[in-house]
Image (cartoon, rainbow, N blue to C red):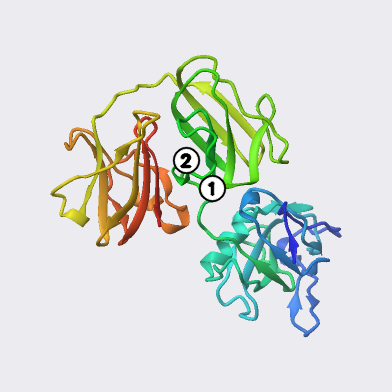
Amino acid sequence: MNKVNILSIVFAGICAFSACTDDKDLVINNLKDSEGNNISFTLNAPNNSSYTLMPENASSIIDIFTCEQPDYGFAAGVTYTVQVCEGGTEFEKFESLPTTGSGEKVLIKTFELNDAMNNLGMVNPTVAYNVDFRLKAFINDSVPELYSNTVNMAITPYSGARTQVYFVGDIFDNGWNNNDPSMRIFADDDVNNMLFTYTGFVKAGSAFKIIQTPGDWGIQWGYDSDGALSNDGGSGNIEGFTQDGYYTITLDLAGNKYSIEPYTGATTEYKQISLIGDFNDWGGDLDLQQASYDKHIWIGEKIEIPSDGGLKLRADHDWAVSFGGSNSLWNDKQGQFAKFDGGDNVKVSVGTYFIKFNDLTKHIILLAE
């Protein structure tokens, strides 16, 4: 199976234009597919009929299709939308990919196709699913929508959960131990990118690298040049901490970029951060452990949540300072990486969890173990 590093759908074709003076004179030159069905233009099958979508390339694009564009009989500004459905279902239930285009190209990101497949129930990352594609051409509400023929492909999705990566280095007191799962790096809400962030105290002269799997140097990111990362295995240590203090590290692992900036925000300290919620009838506190390397990082391992319901974090066993989220942003698809910077109770299912919270930035990791 061909592994795809870049996802784009390019529709290149030739428009034939002729004069038209009135919409009532519009003639659309319909075609017929191999089964005699009316179609408006031809979507050509790609050279490769099988693709594997890769999470590390979620924001990337690849070339898949070409097409012969519709002949409207007049010069038209066309918007193209790619539609997908489970193979053989004749688009009774389909997903339209969000990115549209006009003219020669329609750019489609990997995560958009992956999300569409997940929404249609094609979620197993070990299965190559039978997927049908077609292209919709749209001008305006007064002109009929046109559809291409259907092209079938075998597509393997990836898990909707966010890719996890880990720090290794002497910026923390575990040194260059590459087998510490608690070194997971925080991320923003959007599962569909490879942006990670960390704000905390770092000693001058420290350095780090990033790995994807604890205990394994096989996939790693390190220094290439100032602001640039390399993942070829020969990269250097990432430095840039000129004095003891608080820094924000930002990592774009899809674009192989990084930044290190001094953090100048508030550094209010708390004696304790704890969980409270429906699981304990909002009547007690389940304390997280303060990280040995930073007063603002709180960790809980193998935290038992015995029942479904809402929860929040709060400081010092009191409601004066508490941390909630937005239920609209909190779901399995998000991969449980988010910010608790709102007021809502966050719905969590029964289970055993790893929890890591940064009280400076309100980033949280809450992963079922």
Location of mark 2 (residue)? 183
Above or below, 46 relative to 229:
below
Q: Position of residue 282 (x, y in %)?
A: 16, 50
**Is tag 2's residue or tag 1's residue first in the polypeptide sequence?**
2
Residue in the image at 25% along x and 61% along y: 306
Above or below, 246 relative to 144:
above
For label 1, the SS is loop
Could one spot residue 18 in this view of the protein? no
Quadrant location of the N terminus in the rendered image: bottom right
For label 2, the SS is helix
Marks 2 and 1 in Cβ contact (< 8 Å): yes
Location of mark 1 (residue)? 214
The one nearer the camera, 329 or 32, is 329
Above or below, 224 relative to 369:
above
Q: Residues within 10 Å of mark 1 (few under 14, many from 20)?
A: some
Identity, as a three-letter code, of the amino acid under mark 2? Met
Could one spot residue 257 in this view of the protein? yes
Residue in the image at 37% along x and 36% along y: 362
249 lies left or right of 306: right
The one nearer the camera, 214 or 221, is 214
For this orientation, the residue located farthest to the top is 243
Above or below, 328 relative to 267:
below
CA distance separating discs 2 and 1: 9 Å
Residue in the image at 77% along x and 56% along y: 63
Quarter holding residue 320:
top left
